[in-house]
Image: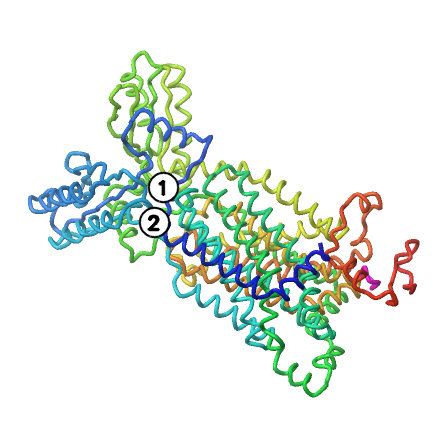
Amino acid sequence: MATFLYKLGRFAFRRRRFVALIWVALLAVAGVGAATASPPSNDSFSIPGTEAQKAFDVLEQRFPGGNAQGATARVVFRAPAGEKMTDAANKATVQKTVRELQSGSDEVASVADPYKAGGVSKDKTTAYVLTSYKVSAMELEDKTRDALKEAGEDARASGLTVEIGGDALEQMPETGATEIIGIAISAVVLLITFGSLVAAGLPLLTAIIGVGIGISGITALATTLGLSSTTSTLAMMIGLAVGIDYALFIVSRYRAELAEGQEREEAAGRAVGTAGSAVVFAGLTVVIALAGLAVVNIPMLSKMGFAAAGTVVIAVLIAISLIPALLGFAGNKVLSRKVRKAAKKGAEGEAAGEEKPNAGTRWARFVLRRPVTVLLVGVLGLGAAALPAASLELGLPDDGSQPTDTTKRKAYDLMSDGFGPGSNGPLMVVVDAKGSDDPKGAVEQARQAIHDVDGVSSVSPARFNTDNDTATLTVISKYKPSSVDTEDVVHHIRDEAASLKSGTGAEMLVTGQTAMNIDISQKLNDALLPYLGLVVGLAFLLLMVVFRSLLVPLKAALGFLLSVVAALGAVVAVFQWGWGGSLFNVEEPGPIMSMMPIFMIGVVFGLAMDYEVFLVTRMREAYVHGERPGQAVVTGFKHGARVVTAAAVIMMSVFAGFIGSSESMVKMIGFGLAIAVFFDAFIVRMTIVPAVLALLGKAAWWLPRWLDKALPNVDVEGEGLRKQLAPDSAVRVERDERDPDADLTRV
C-alpha cells in the first residue's frame, strides 16, 4: 500500500498539470449535470416490512388515482375576539378561500370545506381547510405554493387570523451564516497550524472541490435515485469535515519530510506513502460505517449513507492525488515565512527548536505519569455526560418543533387550541374488508372498537372505495403527535386488529405520519445491535490489520462507544430536556429524531477511527522502529497531537456550522456530531488512549504469531517503503524476537 501510494504521490507531483486538469474537468462535468437536473423528487419515508407501509400499499391498490403520501396543507382560521367562524362574513371568507385553493393549481387533489367536513371547533372560534395534493411536497411546483400563500394572504385581509401548516410549504433547508462561520474558523485554525496562507488554503480548496463534485453528483442523480434534499446537506457536512482533515494530514507530513531535507518531489511521494496510507484506511472505516446504514433497510437512510460515503471516497482520492499535484504548484510557499527565511540564511529551519518538548509531548508525559487517574477522570466524565441518554425518547420532528415565529408553528398552535393537540397528527386506519362476508359491518365494528380505545378523541365516518371492500377512518388522539401517549394509542388500536380479523375476516392497519414515525423508531431499534455488530466487527478487523494488535482495536471500539453514548446524552439534554436550548435555537424540546442514534453511531464511528488511525499509527511506527511502548506514545503525540487537535477543531467547527440550519433534523445532527468529535478526539483519543496504552505496555502491541502470519501486511507505517528507499549501506534496525524489549542491534 505505502509503496503504491508513494509512486502515486510522485506521479501526481510530476504530472501536476494533468492531474489538476482531470479534477477540474470532473468538477465541470458534475456541475453541468447538477445545473441541468430536475429537483429532488421526494423526501417521503419508505419503510418496507412495516404496518404503516403496508397500509399505504393497500391504499394505492384500492384507491387508484389518489396519493396517500401526497403533500397536504392546513389553512387555519381564527375569528377575532367576540366573533365566531360561523358568522356570515367569516364563513363567506372561508368558502372563498376554498374556491381559490380548488382553482389555484392542477396539482390539487381535494379541498375539504370545513363546514361540511367537521373542520370547525366546538367553540366555533377556529376552522381549518384541509388541502390534499396529487404529488409529494418536494414535487410541488412553485406556482402551487404561491397560490397557497396568496389564498392565505387574501383571507388575512378580511381581518381573520390565518396561518398555514402541513408539508406543502416544505422546501430545501437553509443553513444560514453559521455554515460560513464554521468554514472561516477552519481557515483560521489551518493558518495557525501551518503559519502559511498557501498551506492553510490547500485543504480548504481541495475540500471545496471534493464537496462540489460530490454534491453536484448527488444533485444530478437526485431524481433518478430518489434522493432527498437532506441527503446533499449531510453529504456536504461530512465531505467538508473529512476533506479538510485528510488534506491537513498529508500537507503536514509533506512539510515534515521537507524539514528532514527531502527534495520536494520525494517529500510528496513519502507524504502520500505514509500519511496517505493512514488516510486511505481512515477513509475506509468511514465508508464502512456509512454504507453499513443499509442494513437498517430504510431506503432514505441507506441513500443518505451511500451519498455521504461517496463524498468520503472523493475526499480520499483528492487527498492522495490532487494534494501532491497542488504541492508541486505551491513550491516553498507551503512552508511558513520563518522557515523560508531560515532556509535562505543556511540555517536548519525549525530543526533547532525540535529539542524543546511541544505541548503534545508534555501532555503525553503527564498522562504516562498518572495513567490511572487520567483514565478514571476521562471515563467518569464521559459517563456523567452519558446519563441523560438513559431517558432517550425517539420520534420524528413535527411542526411543533418549528420556531414560534413561523406560520407552520402558528398553525400548529391554533389547531391544538381549537381541536386538541392530536389534531396535528391524525392517524389513518385502513380497514381491508375484502375477505369479509359483510364489509360494511366489519368496518363499523372496527370503528366502534377504535372509539372505545383510551386516548382516542374522535373517529371520522368511514370513507369507502368504489368497490366498497376497503375503507379509511381518520382517528384523532387526545395527545400531541410526538408524545409517548399517542404511541400507546397506536399500539392499542393495533391490538384490536387481531380480534377484528378473527371475528370478521377484515384486516385493520394503522398508518399516517405519526404511525409511520413509530414504525421507523421500532425498525431502527431492531437494527441497532446488528448494525453495531457489522460496523464494529469490520472496523475491528481492519484496525487489527493496520496495527497488528488485538488490544488496540478493542480499545478503539470501546472508546468509541463511550464517546457516542456521551454525545447522545448531550443531545438529549439540549433537544429533549431543553438545557441551553436558547443557545441553539431549540424553542420546543421534544423527542430525539428516531434515526439519530444509529446515524450518529455510523458517522461518529468512522470519524473516531480517523483519529485512532492518525494518532496511533505514529505510535506504532515508533514502536516497530525500536522505541519502548511508553516512549512510542510520547513520539506519537509529539508528531501527531498538534495536527489531530487542529483536525478535530476543524471538524467540530464544520459540524457546528450546521446548527444554524432551519431544518431541525440537520440542526440536531450538526450539534450531535460536533459534540461527539469533541468527546472522542479530546477525551477518548487524546486522554483515555494514552492512559490505556501506558497501562498495557508492550501487551498493547501483542498479536499471536499464527494470526500475524495470516493477516495481510498493508504496511501503513511505510516500513517496507523505507527499506526499499534506503541505500544498501543504510543501517537497518531489527528487534530480537527472543526479547522484544532488548536493546536494538544494528546489522
Give SS at disc 2. helix
Give SS at disc 1. loop
Residue 362's quadrant in the figure? bottom right
Q: Residue type at mark 2?
A: Gly
Classed neighbour count for the residue bearing mark 1: other residues with Cα under 10 Å, few (<14), some (14–19), many (≥20) = many
Residue 624, magenta (yes or no): yes
Residue 258's quadrant in the figure? bottom right
Residue beneath the point at 19% across and 35% down: 118
272 versus 477 height, above or below: below
The residue to which callout 1 is attached is 481
Q: Nearer the viewer, residue 13 or 670?
A: 13
Residue beneath the point at 66% across and 49% down: 557
Q: Are marks 2 and 1 in contact (CB under 8 Å)?
A: yes
267 versus 101 height, above or below: below
Look at the image and tell me whether residue 356 can be seen.
yes
Q: Quadrant of the N terminus?
A: bottom right
Please state the total of marks drawn on the protein image: 2
92 versus 156 height, above or below: above
Question: Quick one: which residue is furthest to the top in this view?
Answer: 437
Look at the image and tell me whether residue 668 can be seen.
no
Q: Which residues are magenta?
A: 623-629
Q: Describe residue 513's horizontal placement relative to residue 548 as left or right.
A: left
Classed neighbour count for the residue bearing mark 2: other residues with Cα under 10 Å, few (<14), some (14–19), many (≥20) = many
Decide which of tag 2 and tag 1 comes sooner along the chain. Answer: 2
Q: Quadrant of the C terminus?
A: bottom right
Q: Give the alpha-carbon distance from disc 2 to disc 1, as whole Å.
A: 9 Å
Q: Nearer the viewer, residue 370 or 243?
A: 243
The residue to which callout 2 is attached is 400
Residue 569 image offset from top left, x and y in percent: 53, 52
Q: Residue type at mark 1?
A: Pro
Residue 534 image offset from top left, x and y in percent: 62, 41
Residue 280 image offset from top left, x and y in percent: 64, 55
